[in-house]
Amino acid sequence: MSADTNLDIAALDKAHALHPWTHFESFVRDGPLVIERGSGCSLWDSDGREYLDAVGGLWCTNIGLGRREMAETIAAQAEKLAFSNTFVDMTNGPSALLSAKLAELAPGDLNHVHLTTGGSTAVDSAYRMVAYYQRCSGRPDKTHVIARDSSYHGSSFATISIGKRSGDKMPEFEYLSEGIHHVSAPDCYRAIGERSEAEFCDDLVVEFEAKINEIGPDKVGGFFAEPIQASGGVVVPPKGYLKRMAEVCQKHDILFIADEVVTGFGRLGHWFASWDEFGVQPDIICCAKGLSSGYQPIGAMIFSDRIWDAMQGDRWYASGFTYAGHPVACAAALKNIEIIEREGLLAHATKVGQYFEDRLGQLENLPMVGDVRGRKLMLCVENVADKATKALLPDDLDVGKRIADAAEARGLMVRPMGHLNVMSPPLVITQSQVDFVAETLELAIKEVTDQLVRDGIR
Ligand code: PMP
């Protein structure tokens, strides 16, 4: 029973809600976990149990939950102007101010902003922008795009088709495939094999150029890349990879679209990782999540002067969403950015993120942990059956879920993704909370390892 309402929230939810990305059998069996309250890095469920949320919502609660200042900002804006559209030539203060702020924070000449409702709508807009820009520039056939294996770019029809994580495509549905191509993920742990990191990087660049030539350089208009692949398994590319891929893009007039939905707004200690972490100047940055730290749903496509200039003239940009430039969402995003600046959260994320990397790295001593990877506040643990061969445990053991459940029973939330446990805590996480995460996750992994040994599986 929910303390708030005296209604049985779990039963109502079970009877009526279709959850995103749900597994029917286990949902019907186990029902939902009802979360009632959040503050900082903590969540409380409807039974009053506290959890340290190392998932950060879904890579998004960057400034932490429960901030009165955010609630007051949202309430004040809702009272003053809850909604006004931004179609054609209308605007509102928060929308214009946020656009200007994003242009200031984004690298180089990324001075133009198309606000959206979240990450998928930002990437979806970028997908359309590829053909639009190329055609406005007199290159009518450059409408094909290239993305990578293990990528996730959203859940709309176009963006789920651009992404390519195993298991994301329902066999009951047909996805877009015309004009969408994929190259290998820059996965140093799984794909590097006997090669050195530098050789692996060379091979990836060669593969990319070969793919462009196979499709035809006059047909490829855009390349989508998360600086660090997030939901695909926290895949950190080999050194120099993104820069070299961007150079190939430049050579062939291909727009480089950095999907910074996860990596933006401090997760790696910078506003945007493509430039500050990897030295790449993208043509388009897509962002969401940490843009408002989850206080309001909002996203943005930030794009360059070059694209803006090409679009000018007697033509329509016929694309956009009712809630684009939503004043309440924009006011929340502006306040969120102000808090990140005022509290020095980028510097804090860099420092505490380094500590998190070091602490979690120690888990590589455990017999079931094959790899701990990621950077700063974006890390994951890969569980394996055999560290030498990197062989995985059988899928049906659901090892990531088992570990997540064992951690949850100890008051820690980590995200299970197949064989992985993924973490992206709020930027405000403290060193002692990092210690709690590392110690609790270690206990959870040991508990599951012992179970598997007892069951004769390991
Ligand atoms: N791009 C990336 C890299 C993401 O991780 C996500 C969501 N996890 C999206 C896009 C889609 O964002 P949203 O769920 O807000 O539509």
Image (spheres, rainbow, N blue to C red):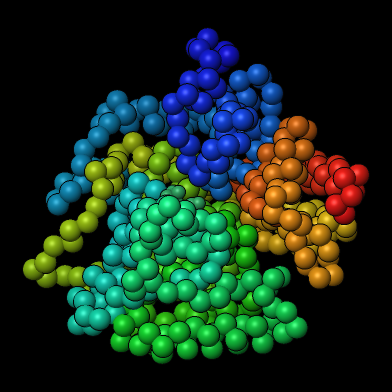
User: Is residue 92 visible to us here?
Assistant: yes
Judged left or right of residue 4, residue 335 is left
- How many labels were placed on the picture? 0
Residue most toward the top? 6
Q: Residue at x 41, y 90 (%)?
A: 213
What is the quadrant of residue 444 in the picture? Answer: top right
Q: Position of residue 41 (x, y in %)?
A: 64, 36
Q: Residue at x 38, y 45 (%)?
A: 298
In what quadrant of the picture does the N terminus appear?
top right
Judged left or right of residue 252, residue 431 is right
Q: Position of residue 339 (x, y in %)?
A: 51, 42
Q: Position of residue 272 (x, y in %)?
A: 50, 61
Query: As rendered, which of 327 and 343 lies closer to the eye?
Result: 327
What is the quadrant of residue 205 in the picture? Answer: bottom right
Q: Position of residue 425 (x, y in %)?
A: 64, 45
In the rendered view, tell whether residue 28 sits above or below residue 261. Answer: above
What is the quadrant of residue 322 in the picture? Answer: top left
Residue most toward the left? 314
In what quadrant of the picture does the C terminus appear?
bottom right
Query: As rendered, which of 314 and 355 lies closer to the eye?
Result: 314
Q: Residue at x 40, y 54 (%)?
A: 173
Query: As rendered, which of 161 and 50 lies closer to the eye?
Result: 161
Judged left or right of residue 203, residue 123 is left
User: Is residue 430 visible to us here?
Assistant: no
Query: As rendered, which of 215 and 127 lies closer to the eye?
Result: 215
Q: Residue at x 14, y 52 (%)?
A: 88
